[in-house]
Image (spheres, rainbow, N blue to C red):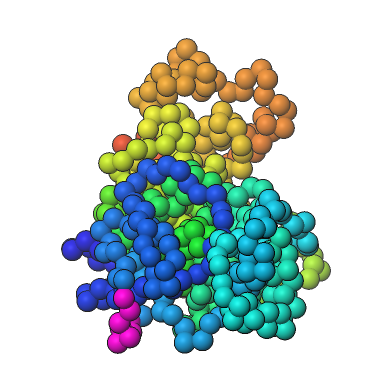
């Protein structure tokens, strides 16, 4: 954490503030397991080889500015502060895992016939959702006593025995065909984290719920796909997290001894705001909740910008609740009869309608609005290479679509889209076509400023007419596309300015959604907007 930066409450729990720094423990020896590894790197990371106390060779990834792990263990070291160089201690009793069972089985087979060559790698058929995997150990010579000890392990649980028998025939891949790590319940990761279930899967990898066996707490572990470009991106994410001083922002490399797993562990939080909206039938959030969300998001992104970082992927899916608790209330169903007395049940604070004799509709209201911003896998340092296209489609700024370059203002634009979605319950721009997207933007915010439009016409002439006006609709545009653009409402219709709260909120969103990034309000300036001086009464 840079001196002089105040960490917002939303991010305080994610930063390690121990001035003494983390203690470093050695990596325990583990069995060999093959996995595809990245062959090129785009950031400063070094790989070193060292021999552990048992004489086995292992590989360690050393992150920049991180001291290498010590070669001896100090039993007096006990510190729960974690860092990029953190390695968990050895357990007093060995942990029975598929990796250990496979190593013992291979040792048994090599001792009985050292001249037999192991058959080629064989993958198992996937069963149900995931595939049971077993590691591929290196061939080692063992004594007859060791072989007898291995033979006794056959009486352990049936799943481990099955893995042992199958693995002795050859290595089994720990990845699926797309490079995703295959998750199995009760698997041990790095001799510390016991997997529970798969939480989600995305382009970069998977996230699993796990139990930290040292602290007996739940954590979420992000495991990166075994594809070089995603591995490189994960290393950049580690740099970002180190910049933010998150205590749990460390990277595991279980070397070549089990598998090369790049995993980021963080405290276990609640569901993302998109999932809450979906489970709530896309009902909008109460206005006082929107104000709380906006203050926390703007503060967190301002903190990133102060560190010269651009998030580039702000969306409700990357905003997690700290607590999922909610209460259920019943609100009238909208219809054609004007009922002024129900006006406080909607964000817009205008006259609501209710269907005659229609039963009320259940709506979930959060007990706590505490949120956390996550997923820095696409975060970019301002002075480093910028990809041409960033941000998820629905939250992408116009300068990105037009290829005009991007910087901090693209985060502000994404936040404007997110706040409108909180207000209405649905995404502001629901499209997957660039020209249609720009046409919808003009429906919401009015025509592009002339200077910005001319710059866009020079960069993307296929989107504009000769007078630098958007070329919409084109002859090939479908009837449905034209209909959806016409159905897009101006922002003043989406957020009716019927009272002081809505007027200030509308003004803030208009400034965040300005076409020209040079005229767009910064997130730091947005925090000083009069909207945040208002005290919004509890409406439900």
Q: In this view, does 260 lie to the left or right of 8?
A: right
Percent position of residue 148, x then y: 64, 81
Q: Which of 84 and 398 is in front in this view?
A: 84
Q: Is residue 471 magenta?
A: no
Q: Quadrant of residue 252?
A: bottom left
Of all residues, the one furthest to the top in this rendering is 466
Find residue 520 and report its image quarter. Answer: top left
Closest to the observer: 512 or 510?
A: 512
Q: How many labels does the image show?
A: 0
- Left/right of residue 455 with respect to residue 429 in the rendered view: left
For the view shown, which residue lies furthest in the left direction? 4
Out of 424 and 407, give the one closest to the viewer. 407
Residue that appears at 71% across and 26% down: 478
Residue 166, percent from left and from top: 73, 64
Residue 37, position in %: x, y? 50, 49
The answer to whether any part of residue 175 appears in the image is yes
Image quarter in which the N terminus is found: bottom left
Q: What stretch is highlighted in magenta?
A: 72-79
Quadrant position of residue 475: top right
Is residue 303 among the parts visible in the rendering?
no
Secondary structure character of the magenta stretch overall: loop
């Amino acid at each position: 954490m840079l001196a002089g930066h105040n960490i917002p409450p939303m991010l305080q729990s994610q930063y390690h503030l121990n001035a003494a720094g983390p203690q470093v423990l050695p990596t325990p020896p583990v069995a060999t397991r093959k996995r595809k590894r990245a062959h090129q790197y785009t950031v400063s990371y070094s790989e070193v080889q060292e021999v552990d106390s048992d004489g086995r060779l292992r590989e360690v990834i050393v992150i920049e500015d991180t001291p290498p792990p010590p070669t001896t263990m100090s039993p007096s070291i006990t510190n729960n502060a974690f860092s990029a160089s953190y390695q968990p201690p050895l357990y007093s009793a060995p942990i029975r895992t598929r990796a250990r069972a496979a190593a013992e089985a291979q040792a048994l087979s090599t001792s009985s016939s050292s001249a037999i060559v192991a058959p080629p790698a064989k993958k198992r058929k996937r069963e149900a959702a995931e595939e049971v995997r077993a590691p591929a150990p290196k061939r080692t010579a063992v004594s007859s006593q060791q072989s007898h000890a291995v033979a006794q392990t056959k009486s352990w649980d049936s799943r481990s025995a099955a893995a042992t028998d199958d693995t002795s025939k050859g290595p089994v891949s720990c990845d699926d065909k797309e490079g995703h790590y295959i998750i199995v319940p009760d698997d041990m990761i790095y001799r510390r984290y016991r997997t529970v279930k798969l939480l989600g899967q995305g382009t970069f990898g998977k996230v699993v719920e796990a139990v930290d066996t040292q602290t007996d707490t739940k954590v979420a572990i992000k495991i990166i796909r075994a594809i070089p470009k995603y591995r490189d991106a994960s290393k950049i994410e580690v740099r970002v997290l180190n910049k933010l001083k998150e205590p749990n922002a460390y990277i595991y490399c279980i070397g070549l001894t089990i598998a090369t797993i790049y995993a980021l562990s963080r405290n276990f939080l609640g569901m993302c705001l998109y999932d809450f909206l979906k489970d709530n039938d896309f009902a909008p959030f109460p206005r006082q909740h929107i104000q709380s969300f906006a203050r926390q998001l703007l503060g967190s992104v301002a903190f990133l910008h102060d560190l010269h970082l651009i998030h580039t992927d702000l969306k409700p899916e990357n905003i997690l609740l700290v607590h999922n608790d909610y209460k259920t209330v019943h609100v009238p169903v909208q219809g054609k009869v004007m009922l002024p007395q129900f006006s406080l049940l909607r964000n817009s604070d205008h006259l609501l309608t209710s269907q005659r004799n229609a039963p009320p509709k259940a709506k979930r209201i959060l007990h706590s609005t505490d949120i956390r911003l996550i997923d820095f896998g696409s975060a970019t340092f301002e002075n480093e290479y910028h990809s041409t296209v960033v941000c998820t489609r629905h939250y992408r700024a116009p300068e990105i679509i037009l290829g005009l370059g991007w910087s901090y203002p693209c985060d502000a634009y994404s936040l404007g889209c997110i706040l409108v979605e909180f207000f209405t319950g649905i995404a502001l721009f629901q499209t997957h076509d660039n020209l249609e997207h720009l046409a919808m933007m003009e429906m919401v915010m009015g025509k592009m400023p002339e200077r910005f439009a001319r710059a866009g016409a020079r960069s993307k002439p296929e989107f504009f007419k000769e007078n630098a006006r958007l070329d919409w609709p084109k002859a090939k545009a479908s009837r449905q596309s034209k209909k959806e653009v016409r159905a897009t409402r101006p922002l003043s219709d989406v957020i009716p300015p019927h009272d002081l709260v809505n007027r200030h909120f509308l003004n803030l969103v208009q400034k965040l959604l300005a076409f020209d990034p040079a005229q767009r309000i910064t997130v730091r300036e947005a925090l000083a907007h009069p909207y945040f001086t208002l005290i919004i009464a509890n409406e439900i």
